[in-house]
Amino acid sequence: MTLKELEPQLLSLTPPEKAQAIQILAQSLANTWQGIIGDKLRL
C-alpha cells in the first residue's frame, strides 16, 4: 500500500484512532532506531 492510498484512510480516522496510529508508528520507528544504533555500537 502506498502513502497516497493510505492517506484518505488515515484522514477518516477518529482522533483516538489517529493517536493510536501515531503511537504504532512511533514505536515502529523507535525499534528501527534501536536496531541501527545497536548495530553501530557493535562495530
Image (cartoon, rainbow, N blue to C red):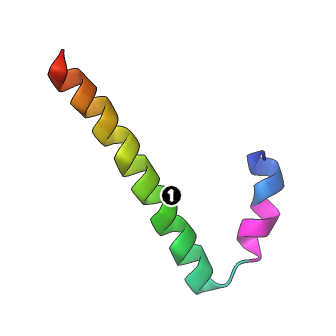
Q: Quadrant of residue 16?
A: bottom right
Q: Quadrant of residue 27?
A: bottom left
Q: Which residue is mark 1?
A: 25
Work out whether residue 23 or residue 11 is closer to the camera in this orientation and state it.
Answer: 23
Residue drawn at (78%, 67%) of the image: 9
Q: Pointer 1: residues within 10 angstroms few (<14), some, or many (20+)?
A: few
Could you tell me residue 19's position as x and y percent?
Answer: 52, 76
The answer to whether residue 42 is magenta is no
Residue drawn at (36%, 47%) of the image: 31
Left or right: residue 41 versus residue 19 is left
Left or right: residue 24 versus residue 9 is left
State whether residue 17 is above or below residue 9: below
Residue drawn at (51%, 66%) of the image: 22
State whether residue 25 is above or below residue 10: above
State whether residue 6 is above or below residue 18: above
Image quarter (top left, top right, bottom left or bottom right) of the C terminus = top left
Main SS of the magenta part reads: helix
In the image, what residue type sits under mark 1? Answer: Leu
Question: Looking at the image, which residue sits at the far top?
Answer: 43
Q: Secondary structure at mark 1?
A: helix
The magenta segment? 7-12
Could you tell me residue 12's position as x and y percent?
Answer: 77, 76
State whether residue 13 is above or below residue 4: below
Residue drawn at (32%, 31%) of the image: 36
Left or right: residue 21 versus residue 23 is right
